[in-house]
Amino acid sequence: MTTDMEDRLRKALAEAAAQVDPDSLRPLTAPQPAGRLVPVRARLALAGAAAAGLAVAAVAVPAALTGTTASDQVTPPSRPPGPR
C-alpha cells in the first residue's frame, strides 16, 4: 500500500469512528440468567412423558407394521387330556 492510500484509509476510519455513539453500543448477545433454566420437576415430568410415549410406540409400531394386534395372536385354550 502506498503512503497516500494509507493516509486516506486512516482518515476514513477516523471519520467513521467519530460518527459512532459509544452509548449506543451493546453486546451482541444478552447475558444469560444464572441458575437452572428449567426446574427439576419440569424436567422429570418431561422425561416421564417421553418414556410413556416410547412405551406406546414400542407396542403400536410393530402392530402397525404387521397389521396384527395382540388380540389377533391369542391361541384358543387347549382341552385337558382325558377321555372324551
Image (tube, rainbow, N blue to C red):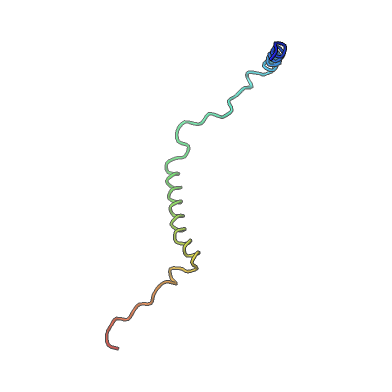
**In-front residue for pair 5/54:** 5
**Residue 18 locus on image (x, y percent):** 68, 15
Q: Quadrant of residue 81?
A: bottom left
**Residue 39 locus on image (x, y percent):** 44, 40
* Number of marks in picture: 0
Identity of the residue drawn at 40% across and 73% down: 74
Identity of the residue drawn at 29% across and 81% down: 80
Identity of the residue drawn at 70% across and 13% down: 2
Residue furthest to the left in view is 82
Residue furthest to the bottom in view is 84
**Residue 56 locus on image (x, y percent):** 45, 58
Q: Quadrant of residue 76?
A: bottom left
Image: 19 above or below 29: above
Identity of the residue drawn at 44% across and 44% down: 43
**Residue 73 locus on image (x, y percent):** 42, 71
**In-front residue for pair 40/28:** 28
**In-image side of 27 versus 77 (left or right):** right
Q: Quadrant of the C terminus?
A: bottom left
